[in-house]
Image (cartoon, rainbow, N blue to C red):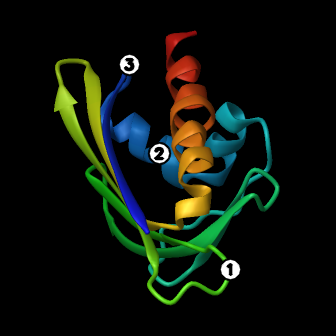
Amino acid sequence: MKDFKKYYILSATPEQVYAALTNAATIQLWSGDPAIMSTEPGSEFSLWEGNIEGKNIEFEKDKKIVQQWYFGDQEEPSIVTMKMFADRNKTSLELRHTNIPDDDYNNIVDGWNNVYFGSLIEFYED
């Protein structure tokens, strides 16, 4: 199991970024695919036509999102924590993804950089 941590800069306020990560209609705007998302702890979510699925664990409005991502039958949960910090009119987002299965690590890191946050960064730069 591996961990991944990275900071991303987004050209939007923390409030806008939080909404973009938690509102299903907004997720569809920047991802291009329908999404199932709720800010109710314990609810399940699905992104990119089920390519990313998991459970929402904790929310702190405009500041923090904690999710469990599903990877088959692994014993320890894979936890994603996103923390948003105001940086002038932008957001510095700290991503921490723990317990990524070794075989999935490179694909997950590529997905974070080029698909997930790549799409979101592009969405706000347009």
Front residue of 65/96: it is 96
User: Which label was assigned to residue 19?
Assistant: 2
The reply to whether residue 115 is visible in this rendering is yes
Front residue of 7/4: it is 4
Badge 2 crowding class, 10 Å Cα cut-off, few under 14, some 14 to 19, many 20 or more, is some
- Tell me how far mark 2 sits from mark 1, CA to CA: 29 Å
Q: Residue furthest front?
A: 103
The answer to whether 87 is drawn above or below residue 18 in the figure is above
The answer to whether 86 is drawn above or below residue 101 in the figure is above
Q: Which residue bears the numbered disc 1?
A: 72
- Which amino acid lies under the numbered mark 3 shown in the image of this protein? Ser
**In front: label 2 or label 1:** 1
The reply to whether residue 98 is visible in this rendering is no
Q: Residue at x 40, y 62 (%)?
A: 2
The quadrant in which the N terminus is found is bottom left
Does the CB distance between marks 2 and 1 fall below 8 Å? no
Residue 41, quarter of picture: bottom left
SS for callout 1: loop
Residue 91 in the image: x percent, y percent? 28, 29
- Tell me how far mark 2 sits from mark 3, CA to CA: 14 Å
User: Which label was assigned to residue 99?
Assistant: none
Q: Earlier in the sequence, mark 2 or mark 3?
A: 3
Badge 1 crowding class, 10 Å Cα cut-off, few under 14, some 14 to 19, many 20 or more, is few
SS for callout 2: helix
The quadrant in which the C terminus is found is top right
Q: Residue at x 48, y 67 (%)?
A: 39
Q: Residue at x 18, y 24 (%)?
A: 87
Q: Which residue bears the numbered disc 3?
A: 11
- Which amino acid lies under the numbered mark 2 shown in the image of this protein? Ala
- Tell me how far mark 1 sits from mark 3, CA to CA: 35 Å
Residue 81 in the image: x percent, y percent? 34, 59
